[in-house]
Image: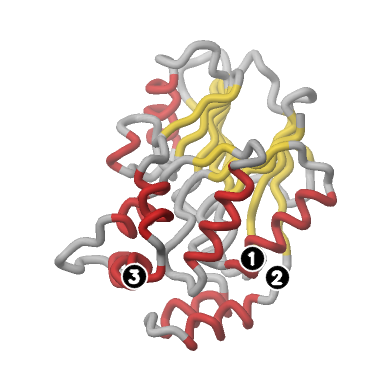
Amino acid sequence: MLIALLSDIHANMHALEACLAHARAQKAHRFVFLGDMVGYGADPGAVVERIRSLESEGALVVRGNHDAMAVSPPQEVKTIGETSAAWTHSQLSREQRNWMAALPLTAQLDNILFVHASVNDPHLWRYVNNERAAAASLDAAAQWPHVRYVFGGHVHLQTLYYRGAGDGLMSFTPQPGIAVPLPRHRLWLGTVGSVGQPRDGNTKAMYCLFDAQRSQIIFHRVAYDNFAAADAVRASSLPSFFADRLEVGV
C-alpha cells in the first residue's frame, strides 16, 4: 500500500492540489493528513472541504495546532500564527469547525503511528527537530502496539530519524525523489515537511510517499503556482508577510 503523507497545508489550495495530483500520478492508494490544514493561507474553507471529501473516501486526518487555534482563536495575540486564527475562524463554517474540533491527535494504521507534533504529549505541540526530541516521541509511541514507524509534521522540514541496536538516534536529511529503505527491525520517525509553507529557501511544496509493502519512503518536492497563492493572501485581509514568505520559501 502506497500512502501519501501530507502536513502543514496552511490553507494553501494551490499547493495542496499540486501535491494531490502528483501523489495520484505515483499511484498513491491512501492519503494521510498530519495536521495544520489551516492558518497563514487564503483558502481555509476550500482546503478543509477538500480534505473532508478525501476523508469520506478513506483518508486519515489528525489535528494540528493551527487547526485547534482556528476552532478557538486566542483572545490575546502573542505569535505570528495567532494573527491569522481569528480570520481563519471567520472563514470556516460551524460544521467545518466542529469537524476539526473532533479530529484525533494521533491515528494508527497497522504498524504506523501518525501525529502532528510529538507523540510525547501531542496536545503540547512539541517540535521534533533534533535527535533528543525524536527519541522522546518514539519512546512515547511504545504504548501503541506494534508501532515501528512514526510520521509527523509541524517543523516544516523533511528529516528521518532511526534507532538501531543502541539507545541513541541517528538522523539524516533525505534527497527528494530518492527511495529510502526503512527496514522493520529498526524504529523510524519521519517529519514529512510542509505542503503549503516550505521554510528551507525552496518554494516547492513538500510531501512523502510511504510504501508499506516495500518498507521504503520517498520524499518529494512539487512545483506549484506559489505566486498565485501569494496573490490570494494579498487579496485577503491577512498580513502581507504571509504572502511574501510563499514567494521565497522561508
Q: Name the image quarter holding the N terminus.
A: top right
Q: Which mark is residue 90?
A: 3
Task: Kindly identify the residue that appears in the image at 54 percent across and 18 percent down.
Answer: 147
Q: Amino acid at mark 1?
A: Ala
**Which of the pair 53/138 is nearer the observer?**
53
Q: Amino acid at mark 2?
A: Tyr
Q: Is residue 170 visible?
A: no
Tell me if mark 3 has few (under 14), some (14-19) or many (20+) residues whose alpha carbon lies within 10 angstroms of its own.
some
**Which of the pair 27/101 is nearer the observer?**
101
Secondary structure under tag 1 reads helix
Q: Residue 108, how many percent across, how many down?
A: 52, 25
Q: Is residue 10 left or right of residue 209?
A: left
Q: Sequence order check: which comes first, mark 2 or mark 3? A: 3
Spatial CA span between label 1 and label 3: 22 Å
The residue that mark 1 highlights is 15
Q: Amino acid at mark 3?
A: Ser
Spatial CA span between label 1 and label 2: 6 Å
Contact flag, marks 1 and 2 (Cβ < 8 Å):
yes
Q: Residue 162, how many percent across, how many down?
A: 56, 27
